[in-house]
Amino acid sequence: MCDETPAVLPSEVSTKISVFDRFATYVSARTSQAWFFVVCVVIVVLWAPSVFLLRTIDTWQLIINTVTTIVTFLLVALLQNTQKRSDDAVQHKLNAIADGLADLMKQLAKEHPELDKDLKELRLAVGLEDHESAS
């Protein structure tokens, strides 16, 4: 297991962010603010009574359902992108902490041989997400 590709540490992560990633981050930042929720509530409040005022209820419902479905679909894709990048960043930080701790344990293991087993387990845990993921 230790012979496999080592985990990517924070210093090895590229700082280049694609246009799509920047766009997804921007949208995520805007849609997580209170004003976006308020706008959504206002749309629902305005839409709900319109069902009783308009004679073409089926058409109006089809329009609002289609628009909300499309917006939801796109937002889920964008938010998934930012969530994945955030999860990856946290994992890189955890790998760096575990790697540093393993180095410290290696030094201490000279005086405390009982740390050898824990050291081996910790080394195996660094990069474990790459071994357990479905991708």
Image (spheres, rainbow, N blue to C red):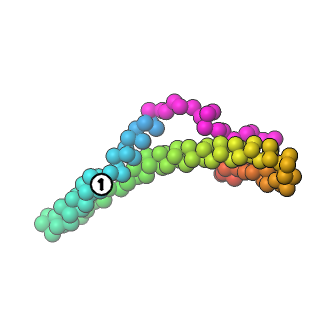
Instruction: Name the spot of residue 127 as percent of width and height, x first.
Output: 70, 46
Relative to the observer, which residue lies in front, 86 or 118? 118
Q: Is residue 32 rendered to the left or right of residue 63?
A: right
Amino acid at pointer 1: Ala
Q: Is residue 91 rendered to the left or right of residue 103?
A: left
Relative to the observer, which residue lies in front, 5 or 50? 5
Instruction: Name the spot of residue 52 as percent of width and height, x first.
Output: 15, 69
Name the chief secondary structure element in magenta: loop
Q: Image point 20% across, 63% down: which residue?
A: 45
Q: Which residue is mark 1?
A: 34
For residue 66, which quarter of the picture?
Answer: bottom left
Q: Which residues are magenta?
A: 1-19
Q: Residues within 10 Å of mark 1 (few under 14, many from 20)?
A: few
Residue 56 visible somewhere in the drawing: no
Q: Is residue 10 magenta?
A: yes
Relative to the observer, which residue lies in front, 36 or 12? 12
Instruction: Name the spot of residue 99 as percent of width and height, x first.
Output: 71, 43
For residue 61, which quarter of the picture?
Answer: bottom left
